[in-house]
Image (cartoon, rainbow, N blue to C red):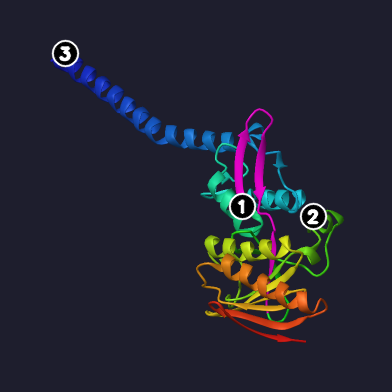
């Protein structure tokens, strides 16, 4: 009998030990992930992992402060409720890049580099160059690239001396009109090939001393180039606009040889070798 009792006591102790071990194991399985998660949250919020500064490189017209303010606003708040957006490791470079490109349409390219040692972010930007103006009938004007992309509204009053000094003397920029309807921002006035054709017209006139101030695409088969000798009407779809321009200049010179003070109301160059014109 005593042997059986000893056996039962031993079995009970073993069962208790196994139960304790099982409870400890269960506790660890539950608590360890919680501890690790809490530790992870505290680590993501550690001061040494938070972005302290943004450094903007390459900005000329867009003010550095505006870019910085947008970037700092981007890192406010949390991701997934717990992870601070200001954490340099988890800062989403792609989303910040897209935000800057959408907000500042003058920016052509944005590159973001993280510097973990000093907890700063370098924002390197490349701006679009304003080569022309595109204007509405109401004379609301926008900057346009040499490839015909309309990218930024021209403010009537410059907000800073820096912006004013970088406007490239607005009065010297050739004005383009027509084609676009509604909000023109980030739309193409023409294809790069068409723009090259129009610019060739401008260059040919410039070489002989005539200045083109604007080009207005009225219809698919009618455009008007305003010059200091009168309006030149041409077909914007003309395949050899350079030849048409050169022939127009020959006509102008022929008339001016007879009458040096002659001024044209218009010259219509849309009909091959035939020109129709009206003198003032």
Question: What residue sits right under mark 1 in the picture?
Answer: 108
Look at the numbered disc 1 and give the secondary structure of its residue: strand
Above or below, 38 relative to 195:
above
Outermost residue, right side: 161
Is the residue under label 3 in contact with that under label 2 (CB below 8 Å)?
A: no
Q: How many residues crowd mark 2 within 10 Å: few (<14), some (14–19), many (20+)?
A: few
Q: Residue at x 80, y 57 (%)?
A: 163
Q: Is residue 158 left or right of residue 216?
A: right
Q: Quadrant of the C terminus?
A: bottom right
Nearer mark to the viewer, of 3 and 1:
1
Q: Is residue 169 left or right of residue 124?
A: right
Camera-nearest residue between 70 and 154? 154
Residue 216: horizontal and vertical position, in percent?
64, 76
Tell me the CA gap for discs 2 and 3: 104 Å
Q: Is residue 8 left or right of residue 19?
A: left
Residue 190: horizontal and vertical position, in percent?
55, 67
| Figure quadrant of residue 57 | top right
Above or below, 37 relative to 80:
above
Tell me the CA gap for discs 1 and 2: 17 Å
Question: What residue sits right under mark 3 in the picture?
Answer: 2
């Amino acid at each position: 009998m005593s042997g059986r009792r000893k056996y039962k006591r031993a079995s009970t102790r073993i069962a208790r030990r196994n139960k304790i071990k099982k409870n400890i194991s269960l506790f660890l399985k539950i608590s360890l992930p919680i501890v690790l998660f809490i530790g992870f949250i505290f680590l993501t919020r550690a001061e040494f992992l938070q972005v302290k500064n943004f450094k903007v490189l390459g900005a000329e017209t867009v003010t550095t402060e505006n870019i910085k303010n947008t970037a700092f606003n981007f890192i406010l708040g949390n991701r997934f409720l717990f992870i601070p957006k200001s954490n340099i490791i988890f800062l989403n470079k792609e989303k910040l890049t897209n935000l800057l490109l959408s907000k500042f349409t003058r920016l052509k390219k944005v590159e973001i580099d993280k510097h973990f040692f000093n907890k700063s972010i370098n924002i390197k930007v490349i701006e679009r160059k304003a080569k022309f103006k595109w204007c509405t009938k109401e004379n609301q004007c926008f900057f346009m690239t040499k490839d015909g992309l309309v990218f930024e509204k021209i403010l009537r009053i410059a907000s800073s001396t820096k912006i004013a000094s970088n406007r490239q003397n607005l009065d010297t920029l050739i004005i383009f009109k027509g084609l676009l309807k509604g909000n023109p921002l980030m739309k193409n006035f023409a294809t790069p090939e068409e723009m090259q054709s129009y610019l060739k017209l401008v260059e040919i006139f410039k070489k002989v001393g005539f200045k083109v101030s604007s080009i207005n695409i009225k219809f698919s088969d009618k455009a008007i180039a305003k010059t200091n000798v009168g309006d030149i009407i041409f077909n914007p779809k003309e395949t050899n606009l350079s030849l048409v321009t050169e022939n127009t200049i020959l006509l102008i010179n022929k008339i001016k040889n007879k009458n040096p003070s002659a001024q044209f109301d218009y010259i219509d160059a849309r009909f091959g070798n035939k020109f129709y014109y009206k003198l003032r």
